[in-house]
Image (cartoon, grey):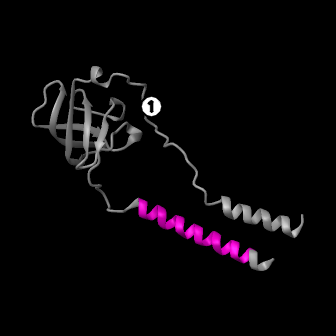
Amino acid sequence: MTVHLRRFLVLLLLVLAPLPVSARPAWACSCADNPDPLGRSETAFVGVAEDVDGSWSGNEVEVRFAVESILKGDAGASVTLITMKDSASCGYGFVEGGRYRVFASGGETNLCDGNELLSSGHPTGDGTDRTLIFWGGTVLVLLFVAGGVTWLVRKS
């Protein structure tokens, strides 16, 4: 293998390595298609998640909604539902302040019920901005690649 071919392959690897790989999330929860979430639910409404409390019972999360409009069933000005903490258990990740179309039965809702985020609220949790971390890492990788390319050009 010639030196030029080897340098070309290293350069190609440095250029292609930082390309993001697109993959869909893998869910342990298996949902069959639910073409009619309204028909299968006991209660359906549009509301804002006011309180998301996962501290009260094992893997369950209690979510209190301020109801804006009722699509089906009996719902007052406020509805409290139970879901699971994580998507692997078919839990739906409600965020405080988010506006949702919610479908529920028996005081519970889950990932397979057809819930829909209509507008996002403020994030809760540890306050980490994952977008900033992603782009910061991307910039570091690009700087590394640029340094490698510069080194290869000067060596030739």
Indicate the secondary structure of the residue bearing disc 1.
loop
Residue closest to the far bottom: 154
Residue 69's place in the image compared with 39, above or below, is below
- Give coordinates of residue 92: x percent, y percent: 33, 40
**Quarter of the image that includes the N terminus:** bottom right
Amino acid type at image mark 1: Ser
- Give coordinates of residue 119: x percent, y percent: 28, 45
The magenta stretch is: 131-152
Q: Quadrant of residue 84?
A: top left
The answer to if 143 sits in the magenta stretch is yes
Residue closest to the far left: 77
Residue 15's place in the image compared with 81, above or below, is below
> In the drawing, does residue 112 fall left or right of residue 82?
right
Which residue has dot 1 on it? Answer: 30
Residue 124's place in the image compared with 113, above or below, is below
The answer to if 81 sits in the magenta stretch is no
- Give coordinates of residue 148: x percent, y percent: 68, 73
> In the drawing, does residue 6 fall left or right of residue 115?
right
- Please name the residue shown 22% across and 23% down the image: 42
For the stretch drawn in magenta, what is the main secondary structure?
A: helix
> In the drawing, does residue 154 fall left or right of residue 24?
right
- Please name the residue shown 26% across and 39% down the image: 100
- Give coordinates of residue 80: x percent, y percent: 17, 38
* In front of the other: 35 or 31: 35
